[in-house]
Amino acid sequence: MTNVHYAELDSPVGQLLLTADESGALTSLSVPGQKGGRTVQPDWRPAPELFGDAREQLTAYFAGELKEFQLELRPSGTDFREKVWGALDSVPYGATTTYGEIAARIGASRVAVRAVGGAIGANPLLIVRPCHRVIGADGSLTGYAGGLERKLQLLKLEGR
């Protein structure tokens, strides 16, 4: 079993909990009260030194100075989920897309839109992997594991 290293970072959307594997690759980023979010476990190791790049880039993002993260990511999920999460990376800063558009990007059928939504909802790397940029086909703000208020806050930060 791989050791889990973690650090916490204050942010405008609440305290962020970051986890990484032994190589320092980011495995999750959670916010307080997040649906399916992580919480510090007794066997986890605090290792703030592993998160310098993430801390610097997140600080710049919240200051409006960074539009694209350049971090090594190593989330754990099914092949389908990882394909969906990868598609999130192609949604540019300040833009939005729909669940149907993400499904089309990965070659999934219209019937698979619900499964795409489930994969987006299970995104373990909030903010860094921009699931907050996915909205309903009618333009409405729909589900966000970190809460709709945070989703709105992130979209406003990005000028939406």
Image: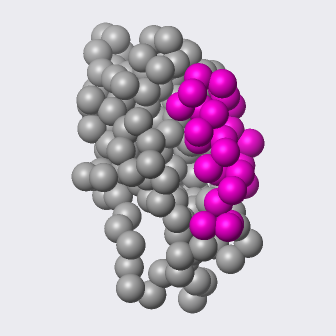
On the image, the x and y values in percent for residue 155 come to: 43, 21
Magenta residue span: 48-72
On the image, the x and y values in percent for residue 119 come to: 43, 47
Q: Is residue 24 above or below residue 43?
A: above
Using the rendered view, name the quadrant where residue 22 is placed: bottom right
Q: Is residue 122 above or below residue 91?
A: below
Q: Nearer the viewer, residue 141 or 158?
A: 158
The residue depicted at 36 percent of the width and 15 percent of the height is 137
The residue depicted at 53 percent of the width and 76 percent of the height is 46
The residue depicted at 44 percent of the width and 48 percent of the height is 10
The reply to whether residue 116 is in sight is no
Could you tell whether 94 is left or right of 114 in the image? right
The residue depicted at 53 percent of the width and 69 percent of the height is 6
Using the rendered view, name the quadrant where residue 86 is placed: top right
Image quadrant where one finds the C terminus:
top left
Q: Main secondary structure of the magenta part?
A: helix
The reply to whether residue 17 is in sight is yes
Q: Is residue 37 above or below residue 69?
A: below
Task: Say whether residue 63 is magenta.
Answer: yes
Task: Say whether residue 158 is magenta.
Answer: no
On the image, the x and y values in percent for residue 55 come to: 62, 50
On the image, the x and y values in percent for residue 35 come to: 27, 52
Image quadrant where one finds the N terminus:
bottom right
Image colouring? one colour
Q: Is residue 25 above or below residue 82?
A: below
